[in-house]
Image: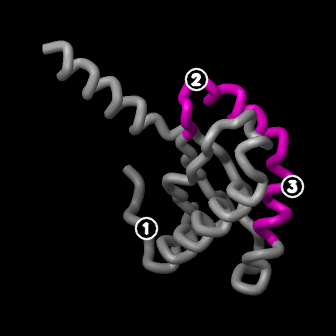
Amino acid sequence: MEKPATTRQLKVAREIQKDLAEIIRGKGMAAFGGAMVTVSEVRISPDLSVAKTYVSIFPSAKAEEVMKLLEENLRTIRGELGRKVGRQLRIVPEIVFYLDTTLDYAEHIDQLLKEQ
């Protein structure tokens, strides 16, 4: 079982979430094949070296393509993040992208309820 995040972890995670959202928004929808990419959550490791970044993608049909693009641009994104948080953090965390499927799940439940 994971230990609850410390106040510092939460603050750093929030800052990274805000900065990553800004970086991705700055690239524009065209960079991701017209998909809208939202950074829904960031969880940072206790030593602040790994940032698990959850992204939701709309439309979800483009999810696989967008995840591939994020992976391909990981070094560039991390570099930009480093320029933003370099003054606050000694090391720029390694970014690991995960697909946030909570919206898809909610949509699926909604669809099932409509069928009743």
The answer for how far apart the CA atoms under marks 3 and 1 are is 28 Å
Residue 5's mark?
Answer: 1
Q: What residue occupies the far top of the structure in this picture?
A: 115
Which type of secondary structure does the marked residue at label 2 adopt? Answer: helix
Q: Which residue is mark 3?
A: 76
Q: Residue at x 74, y 33 (%)?
A: 33
Question: Relative to 105, is 82 on the left or the right?
Answer: right
Mark sitting on residue 79:
none
* Residue at the outermost left position: 116
Tell which of 64 and 25 is nearer to you. 25
Residue at left offset 80%, top offset 48%: 74
Mark 3 vs mark 2: give the one in front.
2
Q: Earlier in the sequence, mark 3 or mark 1?
A: 1
Amino acid type at mark 1: Ala
Considering the whole magenta stretch, tell me its main secondary structure: helix
* Dot label at residue 61: 2
Magenta part of the chain: 57-82
